[in-house]
Image: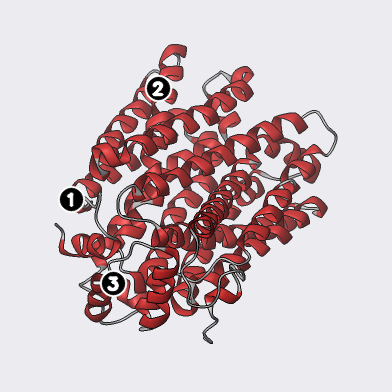
Amino acid sequence: MATTPVTEHNEPSTPPGAPATERERKRLHTKLKLATQIGQGIDGYIIGGIGLAMGAITDDLQLTSVEQGMVGAAPLIGIFVGGPLFGRLADRFGRRPVFLIDMLIFLVGSVLQFFVVDGPQLFLIRLVMGVAIGGEYAIGAPLLSEYAGRRGRGRLLASLEISWYLGYALATVVGALFTSVDGGWRWSLASSAVIALVCVALRGGIPESARWLLSQGRRDEAEALIEKYGIEVDVAAELDERAEVRQDGFRALFSRQHVRSTVFASVFWAALVLPYFAIGTFWTDVFEALHMGDNAVAALLVYSFTAVAGVTAGCLVVERIGRRKLLIPPFWITAACLALVAVWPSSTPVIVVGFLFFIFLNAASSALTAVYPLEVFPTSLRTTGVGFATAMSRVGAAIGTFLLPMGLDHFGAEFVLLVGAGVLVAGAVVSQFLAPETTDLDLARAARTAREGA
């Protein structure tokens, strides 16, 4: 890949090689943070937008239960492809070009949703948008992490999940506003184009990652970028990591060096999101199965904003209590919550309290999905590893989303909730044995800690 001088595309007022002013540094960091946060927000918006629209889509497009499951699961299936694909491209060709191309796909896909005429078309478009969502997970948080300092990095990255949940909640509000409009689901789904357009504008001019340049042996370019923008990077540790990583690509994820990190990142992420996506996508159906269908819309709004509160709490405490304490205890508690609702499905207080605790704590731990995966892989494998973990997390979520309506029809809500509780228990067990403590460590040293099982 040809080398492009950073200064030509970012701050033309600064002479080549000269340190950026404090104002220019802050402008770059603000622009990068906003471009990444909005990207995460649009991910949540696209996935959350289908919840209240599904009923109208089913009626207008005459979807069968299988087609409902396919449309609901389409973005999750796309993520399975997009995470590894865009992650590998970002490790191979650089963070910067992938960061921009990914958002252009969102923009086009958002507009096309307005014009669909049947279920297969909507499935294909949302599948492609899911590919872009996978790419966003693989490139957005890793790029931001590579500009972040070691102190406060967890809080900064966890704030991306706040953006995701805010996007999800906003989509729910927009969907509710359009429920009484004829064909309103088209406007609701296509409205993500506005967010994508803003994000495309922000991503122009963001320079390449200095850590990625170091991983490619381009030390002079990296050090010039570090000096210009005052980026906190342990250059020696990054170079040591580059020397120790003996191979790259997908095969490296399953080498003796990195398989521990690969298994941990994939399993904990999948266990967190499977119950959330499956229940959230078919929230109305779940509440009807629990004989509370009249309260489903109001409950979904409460669900969405409780999740925002939960992920905000996770963001606030991630640096105080550490990664492991934010992950492992909530796994056990949320599993108990779903199990209690399954055991006492006729008790309204149990349903309300159980779901509120599940939503709040699940969202709090989900702050770590923007933190842990990118801390446990070295720079040369970071986006490949995050992309693969993203894909694995969505395999379970897609299966759960596809099977949930059929599970409700054949076995009932109690069985579905017990399966969700079992998934959370599995996540707790794996995290207990494999989760490293990476709080306040430089990214290169965090990856080494994960690799060594410290």
Foreground residue among 337 and 261: 261
When asked about the image quadrant of residue 366, the answer is top left
> Residue at 56% across / 18% down in the picture?
292
Residue at the spot of label 2: 354
The amino acid pointed to by label 3 is: Val
* Secondary structure found at label 3: helix
Question: Which disc, if any, is residue 235?
Answer: 3
Residue 386 falls in image quadrant? bottom left
Crowding at dot 3, Cα within 10 Å, few <14 / some 14-19 / many 20+, comes out as some
Task: Choose mark 1 or mark 3, whichever is in front.
Answer: 3
Q: Which mark is residue 433?
A: 1
Of helix, strand and loop, which one carries label 1?
helix
Q: Residues within 10 Å of mark 1 (few under 14, many from 20)?
A: few
Which residue does the image show at 59% across and 46% down from the upper left?
47
Mark 3 or mark 2: which comes first in sequence? 3
Residue 85 to residue 402: above or below: below
Percent of width and height locating residue 416? 44, 35
Measured from the top left, where is residue 36 in percent x and y? 53, 54
Q: CA distance from mark 3 to mark 2?
A: 48 Å
Reading the chain from its start, which is encountered first: label 1 or label 3? 3
